[in-house]
């Protein structure tokens, strides 16, 4: 058992380095921070790639180094993997399909080595559920033209197009809020909320760039991200009191 847990930690650490660094997660996220003019027209795409692979994927991988088999971290990786695969099929982007299969292999190996506990599902948090319902149509509307990419413009990292990957980010963010609603967990709520806020604020600053949500869309997206974090935290503070009340009234 100890050997398998050590193996799970090693695989999670290597995977975090690969997806978060070697797969350009950190580098792409810093493009807009460094104001690299070479990629100015693609700032939103670079940030989207960084948010997906550094925040959505690498953060739970780091948690799995600390806590092998953590069911929430693994569930978040499953959501991210499904989003990448759906985006690949949505845009018929076969290089992205291989990326999604690589993520699936990573998750499968970590689950096998970590022997996770069963994920505990709860009654959906009503506010987070509403935010999912509100967020899904705009995410689909945002992702549809990106997945198809009928423009002559392209942005490539490691042979993979940023266009359908940006659509996958939108799906992943909404999917993580759904996961947070069903598990009452901080990890998916915070990573989804942070990603939405980053993309929203960047869209406000750069409304005319490729993949920008525009000023209005960016403001709404950032506000949605803030609400996700606020209500996830509010729900966690309510939960202990609700449990105490139920225990005192059998």
Image (cartoon, helix red, strand yellow):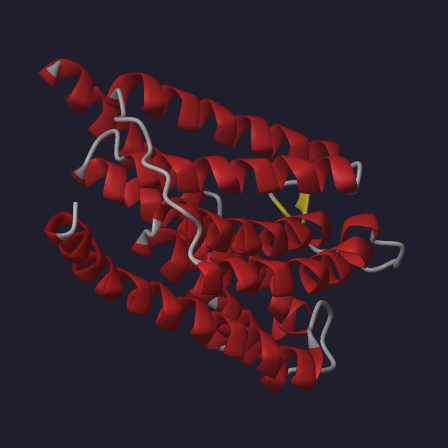
Q: Which image quarter holds the C terminus? A: top left
Report the residue at 73% width, 56% height from top. 140
Q: Residue at x 44, y 67 (%)?
A: 228
Q: With 245 as the anchor, is 180 left or right in this view?
A: right
Q: Is residue 194 above or below residue 187?
A: below
Image position of 146 (left or right of 238): right
Q: Is residue 127 visible?
A: yes
**In the depicted structure, whether residue 16 falls above or below residue 7:** below
Rendered position, 103 above or below 155: above
Residue 54 pos. (x, y %): 42, 52
Give me the residue at 63% from left, 65% from top: 134
In the image shown, does 236 or 65 lie closer to the viewer? 236
Q: Which quadrant would residue 7 be assigned to in this image?
A: top left
Query: Relative to residue 56, is residue 28 depicted above or below?
Result: below
- Comparing 4 with 20, the one in front is 4
- Where residue 145 appears, as percent x and y from the top left, is 82, 57
Q: Quadrant of the N terminus?
A: top left
Residue 198 is at least partly visible in this image:
no
Residue at 83 percent across and 49 percent down: it is: 148
| Percent x, y of residue 50 | 49, 57
Displayed quadrant of residue 107? top left
**View extreme (front): residue:** 250
Which one is in front, 152 or 124? 124
Viewer-closest of 46 and 104: 104
């Amino acid at each position: 058992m100890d050997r398998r847990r050590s193996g799970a930690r090693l695989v999670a650490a290597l995977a975090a380095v690969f997806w978060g660094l070697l797969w350009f997660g950190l580098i792409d996220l810093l493009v807009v921070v460094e104001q690299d003019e070479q990629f100015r027209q693609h700032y939103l795409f670079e940030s989207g790639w960084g948010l997906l692979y550094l925040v959505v994927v690498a953060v739970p991988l780091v948690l799995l180094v600390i806590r092998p088999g953590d069911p929430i971290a693994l569930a978040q990786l499953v959501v991210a993997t499904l989003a990448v695969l759906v985006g690949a099929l949505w845009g018929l982007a076969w290089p992205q399909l291989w990326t999604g299969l690589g993520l699936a292999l990573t998750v499968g190996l970590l689950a096998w080595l970590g022997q996770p506990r069963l994920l505990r599902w709860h009654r959906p948090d009503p506010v987070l559920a509403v935010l999912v319902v509100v967020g899904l149509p705009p995410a689909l509307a945002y992702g549809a033209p990106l997945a198809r990419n009928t423009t002559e413009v392209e942005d490539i990292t490691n042979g993979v197009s940023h266009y359908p990957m940006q659509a996958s980010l939108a799906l992943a963010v909404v999917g993580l809020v759904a996961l947070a609603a069903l598990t009452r967990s901080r990890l998916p709520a915070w990573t989804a909320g942070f990603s939405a806020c980053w993309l929203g604020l960047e869209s406000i600053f750069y409304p005319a760039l490729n993949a920008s949500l525009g000023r209005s869309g960016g403001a709404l997206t950032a506000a949605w991200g803030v609400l996700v974090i606020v209500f996830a935290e509010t729900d966690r503070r309510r939960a202990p009191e609700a449990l105490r009340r139920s225990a005192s009234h059998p």
